[in-house]
Image (spheres, helix red, strand yellow):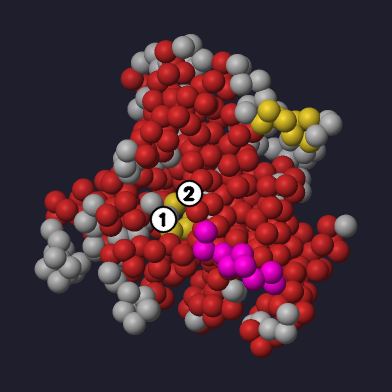
Amino acid sequence: MKKYFQFDKNKTNYRTEFIAGLTTFLAMAYILFVNPSTLALDGIDQLPEGVTRIDKGAVFTATALSAAIGTLVMGLFAKYPIALAPGMGLNAFFAYTVVLGFGIPWETALAGVLASGLIFIVLTVTGLRQTIINAIPPNLKLAVGAGIGLYIAFIGFQNAGIVENSDATLVQLGNILEPTTLLAVFGIFVSVIFLALGFQGGIFYGMILTAVAGMITGLIAAPAALGDVVSPAPSLAPTFGEAFLHLDDIFTMQMLGVILTFLFVDFFDTAGTLVAVASQAGFMKDNKLPRAGRALFSDSAATVAGAVMGTSTTTSYIESTAGVGAGGRTGFTSVVTALFFLLALFFSPLLGIITAEVTAPALIIVGVLMASSLRAIEWDQFEIAVPAFLVITAMPLTYSIATGIAMGFIFYPLTMALKGRVKEIHPIMYGLFVIFILYFIFLA
């Protein structure tokens, strides 16, 4: 094992790699509870006609297994200390835009995720994935990340009851004296404290303390027995294979827009995470990432596996930098993280105490972290500022990641051309311009 992962060359050992793997797991363990809550549309009482609610237990199992499989492949095949799990932002797009907004059944949405994963594999094997990533301007990539952050935070504020509907102004401040809202506010405070003090698993610890506070105050039913904490993993039967059964339903313009959004967002997530983690660990050579093809393939394979089991797009997690910060330098770190995800399968009863108010702070904090990319956008260049601003603001204001991406990608070639910077526009951007024009025509 030491020889396979080249412990001596990377100046590491089993103890360091184990601690790094555990650190990464704790930093991203919140997804085990946030993802099922998001995909099951917790807190949403009225679903579109003909749309049913996805089974929360099955999503929990799919989340843990897809994270374990993707992370294990990344560790053993690509040999990087990078963990994977269903992506934040992509799960919100899946649930709130595709299912709730478009009224598309979750089974068809899973088929869209599967299709995007299969396309990923083809693009990765042929090398086209890297070409497309490079064709999209860095400023738009940064804008997409920041916009998704605002979108996720907006959902978190809603789930917490801090923001509510208003017929006069669309949104307004909710009743912050509502007990459940106060519980969510408490969760925000403790999560911020943990992270400000440098705790790598701050989001996860914040959720645990919030759940405990909810049980103490009687807002959340406390477990009555050991069986309410530990039990066999929930069955995958309600979701397993549904994506295959509904592949025929994805051949519409609406689903084309959905699949393209899955593709674009995962493009940015994976590329950004790989570069960030590799740079921190010192893996970059001549500004290039060794074994990049293997890392991208691991990500693609995890998306396919997750879709088959019953969850939204699986992607590389920036929280992997926590493990690298703890000393992780090889794929063995990922192997350890994957094993912890498998162990987590037996704690599904905790879903009952991880309510929407408990997960809301996690959404808001993740939104804060993602919005940090705003600082790197070239706001002093108007031709760049306009499409970037539209991407960022349209996502939360239209409640759609796809619409935000579409607006920005339409305006980018226009503003750049008007500024006389036609040569800087990659031909692929013109193709996306046409696709998104057609997307809006279809929506109308």
Q: Where is residue 344 in the image (x, y as percent from the top left)?
A: 35, 39
Q: How crowded is mark 2: few (under 14 residues within 10 Å), some or many (20 or more)?
A: few
Q: Which residue is drawn at 73% across and 47% down?
A: 397
Up-down relation of residue 27 to residue 161 (above or below) = below
Q: Which residue is drawn at 37% across and 39% down?
A: 196
Q: Residue at x 54, y 66 (%)?
A: 267
Q: Distance between the residues labelled 2 and 1?
A: 10 Å
- The foreground one among 188 and 73 is 188
Query: Does 238 sit left or right of 400 as displayed?
Result: left
Q: Where is residue 234 in the image (x, y as percent from the top left)?
A: 46, 35
- The foreground one among 428 and 242 is 428
In the picture, the disc for residue 369 is: 2
SS state under label 1 = loop
Q: Which kind of residue does numbered mark 1 sit on?
A: Ile
Q: Which kind of residue does numbered mark 2 sit on?
A: Leu
Query: The C terminus lies in which quarter of the figure?
Result: bottom right
Magenta span includes 377: yes
| Chain part drawn in magenta | 375-383
- The foreground one among 193 and 367 is 193
Q: Find disc 1 in the rendering and name its residue.
A: 318
Q: In which quarter of the image is residue 76?
A: bottom left
Q: Is the Cβ of the residue at disc 2 closer than 8 Å to that at disc 1?
A: yes
Specify whether residue 401 is in view: yes
Magenta span includes 256: no
Query: Does 311 sit left or right of 29 as displayed?
Result: right
Query: The N terminus lies in which quarter of the figure?
Result: bottom left
